[in-house]
Amino acid sequence: MAITDKIYLKNHRQIVSQLDTNIPKRVFSGATLEILYSGEGLAKVDDATRDRLLDFAQDFLDCENSDDIYTGYPERQFIEYLLELRAQGLGPDAIVDVMSDDYMVYAYPGDVLSFLDDSVRTLESVEALADVEGNREMQDDARRAKQDLVGPR
């Protein structure tokens, strides 16, 4: 299961109450994206919630082709955001705190840790394959990206 399947709306009950309709708790659920980010959905929530939802939409849903919303574009953007937070030196608990403050979404720190660990393992595989193929540039890129995730030892 992808990390984006484990990102949830903070204050879900409050938002559902304001919308007067039920939506999934998972942020990247198609129904959640459709209802929350339609003009009608945004008009029904309070100002503070609307501001955070608009920030989320601007940062993760604003793509050149509107069909890209349904091809994984938002999820890829969010994964990049998580990796950037880790590259800044934040641990899983801090990453959850930042995403909660920034966008009113949350994940469990253990899920974030598992995602980061999987990312490191993937980069190790890329590094090893690049070595076998003799692609030094890719090998160095993978090594640097892995170091960004692992941090100083």
Image: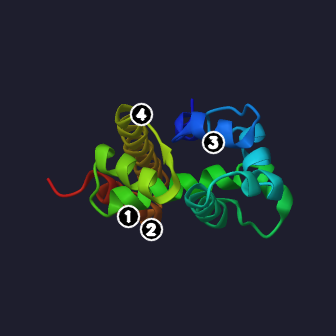
Reading the image, the residue beneath label 2 is: 137
Q: CA distance from mark 3 to mark 1?
A: 45 Å
Which is in the foreground here, disc 3 or disc 2?
A: 3
Question: Is 127 positioned to the left or the right of 12 in the image?
Answer: left
Which is in the foreground here, disc 3 or disc 4?
A: 3
Q: Earlier in the sequence, mark 2 or mark 4?
A: 4
Dot 1 falls on a residue whose secondary structure is helix
- Name the amino acid type tagged 3: Ile
Labelled pair 3, 2 in contact (Cβ < 8 Å): no
Q: Residues within 10 Å of mark 1 (few under 14, many from 20)?
A: some
Q: Earlier in the sequence, mark 4 or mark 1?
A: 4
Q: Residue at x 60, y 59 (%)?
A: 56
- Name the amino acid type tagged 2: Glu
Disc marking residue 7: none
- Name the amino acid type tagged 1: Asp
Dot 4 falls on a residue whose secondary structure is helix
Reading the image, the residue beneath label 1 is: 140
Dot 3 falls on a residue whose secondary structure is helix
Reading the image, the residue beneath label 4 is: 111
Dot 2 falls on a residue whose secondary structure is helix
Is 22 in front, or is 29?
22
Labelled pair 2, 1 in contact (Cβ < 8 Å): yes
Q: Is residue 121 above or below residue 89?
A: above
Labelled pair 2, 4 in contact (Cβ < 8 Å): no
Percent position of residue 153, x then y: 14, 53
Is 144 in front, or is 112?
112
- Name the amino acid type tagged 4: Asp
Q: CA distance from mark 2 to mark 4?
A: 31 Å
Reading the image, the residue beneath label 3 is: 15
Q: CA distance from mark 3 to mark 4?
A: 24 Å
